Amino acid sequence: MKYFEIIKEGFRVANRNLAVLLTQVLAGIVMLFFFLLLTVIFVLAAISAVPSLNLQTLSTDNLSGLVKTSLTLVAAGALLVIIFVLAVAFITAFVHSGNLGCMLKTARKKARGFTTGEFFASGGRSVWAMLGLYIIWGVVTLFAAFVFGAVGATGYQAVLSPLMVEGRRVLAFSLGVPFITALILGGLLFLFFVYAGWTFSAIILVGEGLGASSSLGASYRFIKKNFWDALLFALLMFALVFFANILWNIATMPFHITKETDPSVAAGLLPVVLFGLLLQMYIGLIARSGFVVFYIDRTTPAPPADAGFSAPSGTISGPDNAPESPSDAGPPQENSPES
């Protein structure tokens, strides 16, 4: 399929799975409610700890009790933050897996669109593997950021800065431009690897039923086999999402300008902000659907060619041109003496 056909099919898959946007909104509401619940629990724990402190006298026992209470509240706050992060990761992984399962079935023509049964089946089947994939990509991203930062800082401090201090600016410029260019190109290549690799590995994880590490390896092999094809398509989808973000920022700029100076005008522009947010989510859904269609198209083997026997030149024996029977051909002709 051509890119235009893939995007067209991605529109079809996205429009048949508009309920994906609803699941994302509901997941956001659940996470917000859970955050407020944990916040209330922490505030109530802090309020209950205040009466036990006697701040009228600053004795050693009071100071010790204040330190213990403070440390207890800090530990409780850290525990609640960890619980919240784990809950958010679980909800996100479940919703992500369920939505991908519905889009994959739709793209493979095995379902007409989003179904709650497929959503919960795919989510329950792949949630733990998706969580593992989150952890792997998080570690990879942090490690790559550390490497790029270390290389950039080392190159500047060890080479470029001493040359500039010594007054050798031309040499520093001659070395600095290729160094910075190579660093930027490496960063862009890594961004492509993260964007495409993360997207394809999640699709493979849900679509093929693989684990986190296996889907990561399969994603690497798929990108390696279709490098330039995947690179161009990923750039196309990235540009689509990027321009959607720009349009959303332009549309919501009046709201951000007036929310501090004129709250009443900002309140009137709130529907525009919500519409822009939904439009941004819809563009993201189209991009994900396009990646799903691209992966299915590039991994589906071509139908086998017609294996029928080619007819030899000349007469083909068959019912319509079978040799005549003796009864139909008439009596055999005797050779005449003249022949």
Image: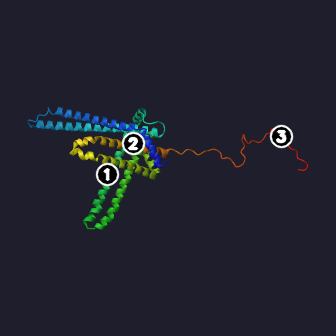
Sequence-first tag of 3 and 1: 1
Dot 2, crowdedness within 10 Å: few (<14), some or many (≥20)?
Answer: many
In screen coordinates, is 10 left or right of 277? right
Measured from the top left, where is residue 142 in percent x and y? 32, 48
Sequence-first tag of 2 and 1: 1
Which residue shows up at 33% across the image and 64% down it? 175
Q: Which residue is mark 3?
A: 330
What amino acid does circle 3 point to? Gly
Residue 13: name its quadrant. Answer: top left
Give the total number of marks visible in the rendering: 3
In depth, the one of 181 and 235 nearer the eye is 235
Q: Which residue is mark 1?
A: 146
Q: Is residue 128 visible?
A: no
Sequence-first tag of 2 and 3: 2
- Quote the CA–CA distance across marks 2 and 3: 78 Å
- Quote the CA–CA distance across marks 2 and 1: 31 Å
What amino acid does circle 2 point to? Leu
Measured from the top left, where is residue 162 in percent x and y? 26, 64
Q: Please name which of the two marks, 2 or 1, marks the residue nearer to the observer.
A: 2
Dot 1, crowdedness within 10 Å: few (<14), some or many (≥20)?
Answer: few
- Labelled pair 2, 1 in contact (Cβ < 8 Å): no
Which residue shows up at 44% across the image and 43% down it? 10
Q: Is residue 53 above or below residue 231?
A: above
What amino acid does circle 1 point to? Phe
Q: Is residue 139 visible?
A: yes
Q: Please name which of the two marks, 3 or 1, marks the residue nearer to the observer.
A: 3
- Labelled pair 2, 3 in contact (Cβ < 8 Å): no
